[in-house]
Image (cartoon, helix red, strand yellow):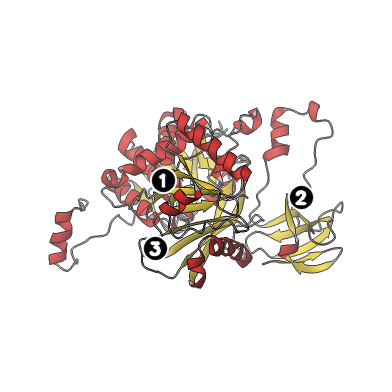
Amino acid sequence: MLLIHCPHCGTRPELEFAYGGEAHVARPLDPAAVSDDDWATYLYLRKNTKGVHAERWRHARGCGRFFNALRDTTTDRILVTYKAGERAPNGGTP
Amino acid sequence: MPRQRFSGLSLLWNSLGQHRGWREQWRRAEPKAEYDAVIIGGGGHGLGTAYYLAAEHGLTRIAVLEKGWVGGGNTGRNTTIIRSNYLFDESARLYDHAVKMWADLSQVLNYNVMYSPRGVMMLAHTVHDVQSAKRHIHANRCNGVDNEWLTPEEAQAYCPPLNIDPGLRYPVLGAALQRRGGTARHDAVAWGYARAADALGVDIVENCEVTGISRDASGAVEALETSRGLIRTRKVGVVAAGNTSVVLGMAGVRVPLESFPLQALVSEPVKPIFPCVVMSNGIHAYISQSDKGELVIGAGTDIYTSYTQRGALHVNMHTLEAICELFPNFRRLRMLRNWGGIVDVTPDRSPIIGKTPVPGLYVNCGWGTGGFKATPGSAHVFAWTLAHDEPHPINAAFTLERFRDGHLIDEAAAAAVAH
């Protein structure tokens, strides 16, 4: 089980968290204007990184807030967590 | 040296020599400089693809590249359940193609894959489960796939260890039974295909990791860079399961996959007690008994993407709680070992089998949590796709483009458990 540092509450066990997938995926501002390819990319294509991955977590059984983490998917080690809306720290792959 | 055939007579003959007369089942091939087709990934699907390319499409210069050892990925890590009770027409055709091939696979390969159609029973615990199961049963029957509804009493008669006490937190309200479903010996599937492909001249190269895909001026595949040197080829089939995103990324192709750990575990071996396969989507558990006597138990995926081939213990605990509730007899069993594999999950939980935007590059991926059951059918239609440069009618709907075009095959039944 992972120990995850919520930037608002501190370090808690994984059981308190929900996973939110790849971070920094922005919804196109005008969906009607984007091509089918770009819309499919937004909906379905994720980096699925083997290595350092920027991803969303939600402290679902705690403060309820979303935040982001950089995690190495080859070791599952979480390198750093940061608040939603902040840019990924250096070394991230947003 | 000709392949040794297995038969009752050859077994008897070799037993007289105390079984010292058996030779290795396939050659330890060195990679050659050039092939007509190369398959990346030496699991059941990849080895099967090479076998059908050689056996049915006349290709002779074929290699299977495996970065580890044959059958060491998800083929050797799954819970070996076979069924075809999928909802949609496209899925029913694809998975039932495989189930029909399982029936005589041991004879075709001259290798006992221990296919055992002992029946797969999927439990319903809520009114919604019941409605969903009955909808699947009717859809299956329309597609010629056997599936039938059992009352709780009938379910218990089919599987005596099942607890149908109405006082359970999630009582058994009934079950859908596919009698042709069952299990097979996972390692034997990989070994059987490897042996049969090798006999047709296919080179099976282990410890050979692909590190790059070279393309010519037109963009088509021309060679693979590997940890054992450059291999020229114009046709590449990627069957790399959880690592598909990484391999296709070498050619600049993105696929809608996410790789998750999926765990399984086995108990200590016990005498035959469990006659079939039981699955519960609702409370996340599936179970069968191997021929060695171990209860083989599977869970849902872990919640986050990963390439570690391991997961968290609480996921297994969640599954074991469900098993203990449904089968109180097993509460005192000790678990022997657990492990994880990395499964490549698509947004609609259906596989992608077909061409990619890169000429000469084909992909068979996205089997998620349920690829083993499809091994022969998947390999068969993928070999066709490579040989003809167009999909077989059975896999024509399972394109990469369906995500752009909105023709998803949104197969909830693909997930043995919710995920």
Hey, which quadrant is residue B144 in on the image?
Answer: top left
Q: Relative to residue B13, is residue B360 depicted above or below?
A: above
Q: Would you name the residue on which mark 1 appears?
A: B181
Under tag 1, what secondary structure?
A: loop
B250 is higher (above) or lower (below) than A83: above
Give me the C-alpha separation between circle 1 and circle 2: 40 Å
Residue at left offset 61%, top offset 62%: B318
Task: Tell me residue B22's x, y (percent).
Answer: 21, 61
Report if the CB atoms under discs 1 and 2 are less than 8 Å apart.
no
Q: Residues within 10 Å of mark 2 (few under 14, many from 20)?
A: many
The residue labelled by disc 3 is B273
Residue drawn at x 42%, y 65% as measured from the top left = B294
Q: Which residue is mark 2?
A: A23
B364 or B117: nearer the viewer: B117
Look at label 1 and name its amino acid: Gly
Q: Give the CA distance from mark 2 to mark 3.
A: 47 Å
Q: Is residue B378 above or below residue B116?
A: above
